[in-house]
Amino acid sequence: MATPPRSWTAEDDKTLAELHGQGLSLHAISKQMGRAKRTISDHAAKAGLSFDRAATERATAASVKDAKSRQAKLKLDILTELERARERFGQAVTPRDFQAVGQGFASGMRALADLARIAPDDGGLEHAQSVLGRILVAIELSLVDGGAKLLNPVRMADPETGETVLVHTEGEWFDLRQRQIEEGFK
């Protein structure tokens, strides 16, 4: 024997109004409340609620705006951490300190680049990149000693030949990086 449908309650009215206010679609509310779409539609109509697409579009636009705001805050947080890493470069004493701070900085740069790739909408990213560029130049200048050997040789692209070369000293690294910047290498 089939069980009779459960009756609609005042709590169901409240839940329907809340979910509708969040911009959920008829289908989403039906699924979340475990009720038939027809039941949801009938009770929404009695409550003066409609499921026109304009309301859903406004809710979607608000969600997108919120997501962009969170992404911008995350980018700003990463930039703040990168600035702190730059300050730690000045406090580094041993080559191992430089290496540790450099690896942390590189990790932060990758995080920022990944975030920019995932959320390519600019929203101030150009400004953040110019700030990052200034930070990188400051770090590069702070590393210049000339003859100091790198703990780990670095592979870099030679802008003149396009080939990868192995760099062994900070001076070689700095010179090659300057040529890359002049040639517009990223």
Image (cartoon, grey):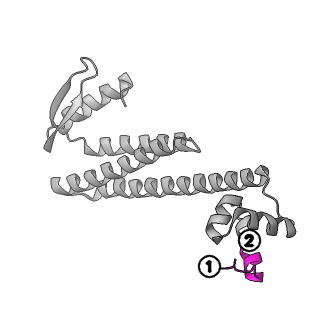
- Please name the residue shown 29% across and 31% down the image: 177
Range of magenta residues: 1-18
Residue 173: image location, x then y, percent: 22, 34
- Please name the residue shown 19% across and 39% down the image: 170
Q: Is residue 178 magenta?
A: no
Compared with 1, 118 (above or below) is above
Residue 168: image location, x then y, percent: 13, 36
Q: Is residue 14 magenta?
A: yes
Decide if residue 157 is on the left or right side of residue 53: left
Q: Are marks 2 and 1 in contact (CB under 8 Å)?
A: no
Residue 180: image location, x then y, percent: 32, 27
Residue bearing the label numbered 2: 16
Decide if residue 151 is on the left or right side of residue 16: left
Compared with 159, 88 (above or below) is below
The tag on residue 1 is: 1
Mark 2 or mark 1: name the one nearer the start of the chain: 1
Residue 9: image location, x then y, percent: 75, 82
Q: Measure how far apart labels 2 and 1 are at the Cα level.
A: 30 Å
- Please name the residue shown 47% across and 45% down the image: 118
Q: Mark 2 belongs to which amino acid?
A: Leu
- Please name the residue shown 24% across and 57% down the image: 92
Q: Mark 1 belongs to which amino acid?
A: Met
Quarter assignment of residue 183: top left
